[in-house]
Image (cartoon, coloured by chain):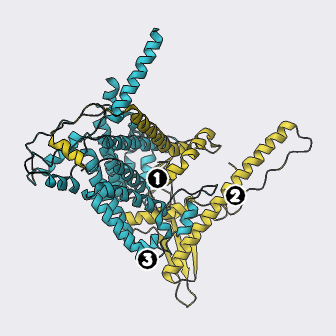
């Protein structure tokens, strides 16, 4: 507590129910900072909400980019889409470790509720497996769009130029996403090799589909039924423009 | 002046008065102090849990090493604003020393010792951990980060803190000082207001995102949440026999989440909105295995509880356990702050 606060207590100053009588310039400055901060806080989830399969809102993207240094530095760049748009399947990672010295291979899976305690630690592993799946980008990109025929009109050629520009931008995003996915996968593999002293490691992304209510009611299907787990392919589908 | 100009002028003056009252009315520190105690304890717990696997998550050979995380934090243009000193720590001994230091800072923030300094340090440490630990984070970390940000801004140590207690001991005995008394400050109000608005943003966009999904409309979303074995901590699948109840809970959840940002301000609906928040987040904590996330969301919702209510409830809770010094001293009145009230004045 500051000396001024202590002094105000000594004088028995009551809580003031009225706005402060600060100079106008001070209020204007604070107000401007508040508006900028609130706009920055809103911009990442707004940009996230304004995305669809057809692309993203150019206006909102520009606003989000403007605030990106601030939201990135303050860790405000989130979409807040908890269990949205739909509570979907969960993702796990299976691994197999092999050794050159004759030891038997070790198989494991994360997250593993039995091994990772307390629950928050388990959740960290769960998010790691989810993140690996979310970052997946296919190894090949879609082929370049075919140019229009020589007899194409000027409008068709202009449209192709736009498609080509979008294609190149999308390809650049895919290259970045693929680099990130490969780096993430490699880092996890290296960690497992280091932790167990293994020579080779194989990772498989697993998707666990939630049971439909009808399957549970009429077929007594268990949430852990073997058929609800499936291995995720590393090759398909091809990346490409949306 | 024409009637139209007068109407516009009256409206503009009303907006300015409302803005002035909303942002620039000093606020007592009780609510922010409670957020500090609960939020600080959550920060401490969150980072204690990192200690269990510190090198596996932050060491040189971690699950996601520093270079990988730096790449993950880059956008398509190669820009990375997610700063962290933890990118540069290779030595396990140094990592542990910094980590223990971080735990001490969080503990000091929780008890309110050197709060001005520790709140800034706690913010920097929290953001540094979040930025370094990309790929292992979830809603808890987002909430931790923004609570730490606003604790740094306000006078969170203004009451119920070691700072306040030490300051009261330093005062001359002749003064009628009570540890229960404290002063309203502008920066506390700014912190609380920003916390409130941030909560509204989180719920609004959480609701909008849900509205894009089919299952939130056809009433099956809650079933699919309960049917996720990896989240489940309490088996609620028996609700499948009460499909109408699942659907009702689904619709109520998405309605409440979307309209939270409107319903939380009027005095009439604020308690109902907060009760709903407690219900939803206790449900998430108990049924979906995210106790920390459920709790931290409730801590965020504390921002909407009036300081006088917080002060009275805390006094009522602690009264059986201790004689509160200065209990008979009348505490200064605290203004109930509500945007709805401000708007109607």
Characterize the local packing of mark 3: few (<14), some (14-19) or many (20 or more) Cα atoms within 10 angstroms.
some
Q: Are both tags, 3 and 1, on one chain?
A: no
Q: Residue furthest top?
A: B2
Tell me: B226 left or right of A39.
left
Vertical relation: A12 (above or below) B147: above
Q: Which residue does the image show at 48% across and 42% down from the upper left? A: A42
Q: Secondary structure at mark 2?
A: loop
Disc 2 or disc 1, which is closer to the eye?
1
Disc 3 or disc 2, which is closer to the eye?
3
- Colour used to depict chain B in the structure image: cyan
Q: Check disc 3 and report the residue beneath it.
A: B92
Q: Nearer the viewer, residue A193 or A6?
A: A6
Q: Which residue does the image show at 69% across and 58% down from the upper left? A: A238
Q: Secondary structure at mark 3?
A: helix
For residue A74, which numbered disc appears in the image? 1
Q: Nearer the viewer, residue A240 or A107?
A: A240
Q: Check disc 2 and report the residue beneath it.
A: A238
Q: Nearer the viewer, residue B311 or A6?
A: A6
The x and y percentages for residue A185 are: 58, 69
The x and y percentages for residue A196 are: 49, 82
Q: Are both tags, 3 and 2, on one chain?
A: no
Q: Chain of mark 3?
A: B
Tell me: B114 left or right of A183.
left
Residue B48 in view (yes/no): no
Q: Are both tags, 2 and 1, on one chain?
A: yes
Characterize the local packing of mark 1: few (<14), some (14-19) or many (20 or more) Cα atoms within 10 angstroms.
many
- Colour used to depict chain A in the structure image: yellow
């Amino acid at each position: 507590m500051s000396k001024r606060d202590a002094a105000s207590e000594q004088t028995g100053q009551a809580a003031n129910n009225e706005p402060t009588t600060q100079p106008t310039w001070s209020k204007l400055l604070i107000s401007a900072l508040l508006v900028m901060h609130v706009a920055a806080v809103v911009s990442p989830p707004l940009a996230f909400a304004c995305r669809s399969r057809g692309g993203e809102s150019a206006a909102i993207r520009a606003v989000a980019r403007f605030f990106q240094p601030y939201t990135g530095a303050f860790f405000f760049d989130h979409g807040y889409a908890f269990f949205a748009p739909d509570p979907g399947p969960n993702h796990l990672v299976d691994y197999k470790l092999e050794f050159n010295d004759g030891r038997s291979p070790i198989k494991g899976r994360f997250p593993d509720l039995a091994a990772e305690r307390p629950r928050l630690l388990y959740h960290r592993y769960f998010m790691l497996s989810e993140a690996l799946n979310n970052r997946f980008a296919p190894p090949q990109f879609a082929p370049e769009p075919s140019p229009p025929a020589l007899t194409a009109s000027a409008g068709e050629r202009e449209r192709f130029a736009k498609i080509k520009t979008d294609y190149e931008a999308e390809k650049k995003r895919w290259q970045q996403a693929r680099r990130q996915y490969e780096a993430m996968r490699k880092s996890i593999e290296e960690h497992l090799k280091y932790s167990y002293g293994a020579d080779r490691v194989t990772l498989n992304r697993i998707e666990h589909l939630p049971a439909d209510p009808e399957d549970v009611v009429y077929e007594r299907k268990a949430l852990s039924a073997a058929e609800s787990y499936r291995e995720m392919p590393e090759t398909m589908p091809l990346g490409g423009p949306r | 002046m024409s009637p139209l100009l007068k109407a516009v002028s009256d409206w503009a003056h009303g907006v300015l008065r409302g803005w002035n009252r909303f942002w620039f009315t000093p606020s007592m520190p009780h609510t922010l102090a409670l957020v500090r105690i609960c939020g600080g304890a959550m920060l401490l717990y969150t980072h204690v849990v990192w200690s269990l696997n510190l090198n596996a998550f932050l060491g040189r050979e971690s699950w996601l090493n520093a270079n990988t995380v730096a790449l993950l934090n880059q956008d398509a243009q190669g820009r990375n604003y997610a700063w962290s000193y933890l990118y540069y720590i290779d030595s396990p001994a140094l990592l542990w020393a910094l980590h223990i230091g971080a735990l001490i800072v969080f503990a000091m923030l929780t008890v309110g010792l050197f709060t001005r300094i520790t709140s800034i340090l706690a913010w920097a440490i929290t953001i540094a951990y979040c930025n370094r630990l990309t790929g292992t984070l979830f809603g808890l970390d987002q909430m931790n980060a923004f609570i730490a940000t606003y604790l740094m801004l306000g006078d969170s140590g203004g009451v119920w803190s070691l700072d306040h207690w030490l300051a009261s001991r330093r005062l001359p005995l002749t003064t009628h000082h009570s540890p229960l008394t404290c002063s309203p400050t502008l920066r506390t109000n700014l912190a609380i207001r920003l916390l409130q608005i941030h909560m509204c943003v989180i719920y609004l966009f959480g609701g909008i995102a849900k509205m894009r999904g089919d299952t939130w409309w056809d009433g099956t979303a809650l079933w699919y949440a309960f049917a996720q074995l990896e989240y489940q901590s309490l088996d609620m699948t028996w609700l499948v026999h009460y499909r109408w109840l699942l659907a009702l809970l689904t619709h109520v959840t998405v309605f409440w989440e979307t309209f939270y940002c409107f319903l939380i301000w009027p005095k009439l609906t604020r308690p109902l909105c907060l009760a709903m928040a407690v219900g939803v987040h206790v449900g998430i904590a108990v049924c979906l295995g995210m106790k920390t996330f459920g709790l931290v969301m409730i801590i965020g919702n504390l921002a909407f509880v009036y300081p006088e209510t917080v002060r009275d409830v805390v006094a009522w809770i602690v009264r059986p356990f201790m004689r509160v010094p200065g209990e008979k001293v009348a505490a200064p009145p605290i203004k109930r702050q509500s945007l709805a009230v401000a708007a109607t004045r």
